[in-house]
Image: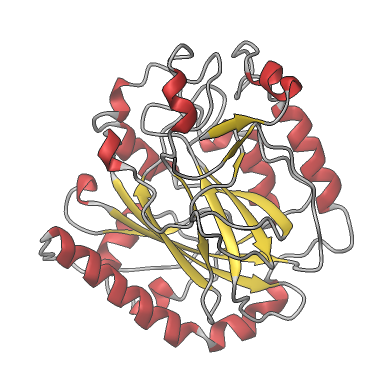
Amino acid sequence: MVHFLSSVTLAVSLMGAALAHPGHDINLEIMERAAYAAQPEYRNLDHCAAEIKARDHQLIQRRMAMVDELRAKRGIKVKRTVAEVLAKNHQSSKAVTPDSSYTAIFGSNNSCILQPETTEGPYYVTGELVRRDITDDSVGQAGVPLTFDVQIIDTTTCKPLPQVALEAWFCNSTGVYGGVVANGNGNSADRTNLDNTMLRGIQFSDASGILQFDSIFPGHYTGRTPHIHILSHIGSTTLTNGTITTGKISHVGQLFFDQSLITRVEATSPYNTNRQSLTTNQNDGIFAQEAATSDPVLNYVLLGSAITDGIFGWATVGINPTISKTVNAAAHYDGPN
């Protein structure tokens, strides 16, 4: 069951939809990100390049196996190579050709740096469930299947970080967030959405700093390009109701997608029924800021010949585990009734 944390939070959540999220000032978030990026402790993963490269082989083998597993699960037989698909669809900064090796594809050093001073947005809900599959397809969450694989790196040591609880949440194919009832977020009269856990969940990183989520490709809403919110917890433990202790919240950030991939997904159903205006990456202020200092775009490969067969994406995420951040949540989820 979801509980709003305060009457103030509820009032903010129910404001008009003039901003990207109701009650959310994107310009304020952009300024906060800029202020943090200017601080000495902010760093990208360039200094970790050698360490990451040394672990490439293990990551490549894992990701190859995961793609094969996902294809087998969906009964997909592929006549072309992963390299061909990636070279055609992903605007990579690397020179990938149809003859490129798996090392060139899966060994990419794209990295997103999660920043402790960014805002978590007005639709953050605490107390979400520890689970890999966050599609909630039992309540009809249709969309293009997306599995994304994240390796978490300590920016102070360049080593993988185990036992980090990474939280992910994003809107569905038509731009609606579960867990929140607010003007501008779907049907504001539907109170059942408060207990809707769709596209929200938590995964712990393993000994290699790696975790995965099974989901669908996020949709869009006015003012923002499709994106995934992520937040890291240090020192959290799993509770008996399937949620976690808060631990220390270290960083907050967002992951993005190639515009060409977004265009292909948005042409499919039910994404193409969304009547909210689509903001491109080029016109998204938060995307521009993230991309100025790191690469927040997921690498990806299509699992089959059609976009609807599914997508496998991956990224390296850097955090500084010594930093602690206070976040504001719109609501708290107590776990299943």
- Where is residue 324 drawn, in percent x and y? 81, 58
Residue 220 position by quadrant: top left
Left or right of 78: which side holds 249? right
Left or right of 51: which side holds 134? left
272, above or below 35, in the image: above
| Along the line of sight, the residue nearer the viewer: 6 or 77 | 6
Q: Can see residue 195?
A: yes
The mark tally for this picture is 0
Q: Quadrant of the C terminus?
A: top left
Left or right of 66: which side holds 184? right
- Where is residue 332 drawn, in percent x and y? 61, 38
Q: Can see residue 142?
A: no
Q: Residue at x 24, y 30 (%)?
A: 269
| Along the line of sight, the residue nearer the viewer: 308 or 163 | 163
- Where is residue 120 drawn, in percent x and y? 67, 41
| Along the line of sight, the residue nearer the viewer: 325 or 299 | 325
Q: Residue at x 16, y 54 (%)?
A: 305
